[in-house]
Amino acid sequence: MAKHSSAQTDRFVHDRLPPPDQWPELRYDLPELQALPEQLNVVQALFDRAVVAGHADRPLFRSDERTLSYAQARAEVNRFANALAQMGLRPGNRVLLRGGNSVAMALAWLAVVQSGLIAVATMPLLRATELKAIIDKSKPSAALCDVKLQDELKAALALSPDTAALPLRLFSTGDAAVVLPDSLEALARHASDQTTPCPTSAGDIALLAFTSGTTGSPKAAVHSHRDLLAACETWPRHVLRATPDDIVMGSPPLAFTFGLGGLLVFPMWAGASVYFPSIPYTPEAMVLLMNRVGATICYTAPTFYRQMAAFARQHGIGKLRISVSAGEGLPDATRQLWKEASGLEMLDGIGATEMFHIFISSRPEAVRRGAIGQVVPGYEAKIVDEHAQELPRGQVGRLAVKGPTGCRYLDDPRQTVYVQNGWNFPGDAFSQDGDGYFFYQARTDDMIITAGYNVAGPEVEASLLQHPAVAECGVVGRPDEERGMVIVAYVVLKPGMAADAAQVKALQDHVKQTLAPYKYPRDVLFVPQLPRTETGKLQRFALRKMATEART
């Protein structure tokens, strides 16, 4: 294939990529991956794919206020793109995006990437100091922000004289009848609905995805136009298998690559449609809306499915046919609870911001109890020891992955930690059985070494979740002079359950009966809620801090 030069004249990100010898080995073994062109604009490709398949008049975006077909959405994206051009932006400029999941946020993201700009989407719940760290690292040329979320962004911009005058355009949820003065919609209102997408090369940068990491300075994972389309040809094609008749809904933010793939890029690739709610999701609201809008595919985290189960049993799940779980480990107790309530086998998967999306997963008909799944076609994975030597099947070690996507951090020395000898190391401990099924143990830094034994916190959590008194739990290690570490369980009880010494003993005995006795939690602490990230991940670092401080 002929090489195409970059269309991104702002070389800020390109110049701050890791040196080539620190890149992961990118593999394009599948025929569909080998067919990806060298000149590629992922947004143009997704819209063109819909037109060729005859989906132009089918719905793409749905909300309670409006529905946009693929053709109508493309016209709106073109107007937004022309508005961005009026702002004087040029290909390669970074554009900070701040908004919840809405039609307008999706349109703005598509317009930014179609224009050859680089999307820097941020979580809605981030505060000013957190936003400032992202701004300082990505050096955006403009910001687009939901009017409801402007205060923290303006506070972040005001923290530095370099950003105080950064061009900022607000947008509504996209469903309001009134167009705000000086908003993105106002600028786009009189713009043409025709434009020529930026002729980006496949290797040009589409987005910076900031990790939802729990400690240290934020890391920005860089993904190209090729990465996004390559991701469509792996898990969505071979495992998810969505159809144009599917209506997709879910809770992960579009600023999170799990949400960006599941609630925007992958549905567009399949010719499906996405429903964006006008109210925040709660477990009951998710189930009720699922029934009302006829959703067929749902994305959310394991904790949310566990909370949804009672409402699914009460209200039913309507037309739902696929429930996707990712973002954190799926305890088997949660899988079985959801299956009992809904009749659906969970589609589990593990992915990473650095890899863009899911690389280990199994179709529902190929699930093996306790396993996340098998490696997704297009990827390769193995379990290795601390010296990167592959371990025999059944042994616990570090997960190593390679495929058509991989980690490239923006100007970050931690690149050499994540990528070693061409392999990506997501930081997870796994084992693999003889049939190639992968069994999650823990984050490698969440392994608890107590009295010489290695204990995975999620394994103890899975045991506790089987007890009828437990609603949620988190298990961590606390330093201990005698045992090295002791196992500490933070437990949220179901309503009406007693938080007393008898309950502590009952839970400890339950773990001793279901796991090796040395894995039982020496300390059981009852709490009203667990610390979680905006994407639903349990913040074990916060629990470790609580456990350590409680003993000092």
Image: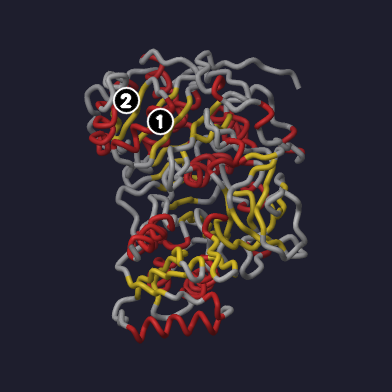
Q: Nearer the viewer, residue 61 or 16?
A: 16
Q: Is residue 72 visible?
A: no
Q: Are marks 2 and 1 in contact (CB under 8 Å)?
A: yes
Q: Which residue is mark 2?
A: 184
Q: Amino acid at mark 2?
A: Leu
Q: Residue at x 47, y 85 (%)?
A: 509
SS class, disc 1 = helix
Q: Nearer the viewer, residue 186 or 374?
A: 374
Where in the figure is residue 201, as x and y percent of width and height?
62, 21
Q: Amino acid at mark 1?
A: Ala
The quadrant in which the C terminus is found is bottom left
The quadrant in which the N terminus is found is top right
Where in the figure is residue 220, as x and y percent of width and height?
49, 34
Q: Residue at x 71, y 49 (%)?
A: 387
Q: Which residue is mark 1?
A: 108
Kindly indicate the quadrant of the structure image that contains residue 332: bottom right
Q: CA distance from mark 2 to mark 1?
A: 9 Å
Kindly indicate the quadrant of the structure image that contains residue 472: bottom left
Query: Up-down: is 512 above or below 219?
Result: below
Query: Up-down: is 117 above or below 260?
Result: above
Kindly indicate the quadrant of the structure image that contains residue 15: top right
SS class, disc 2 = helix
Q: Residue at x 47, y 70 (%)?
A: 487
Badge count: 2
Query: Up-down: is 453 above or below 7?
Result: below
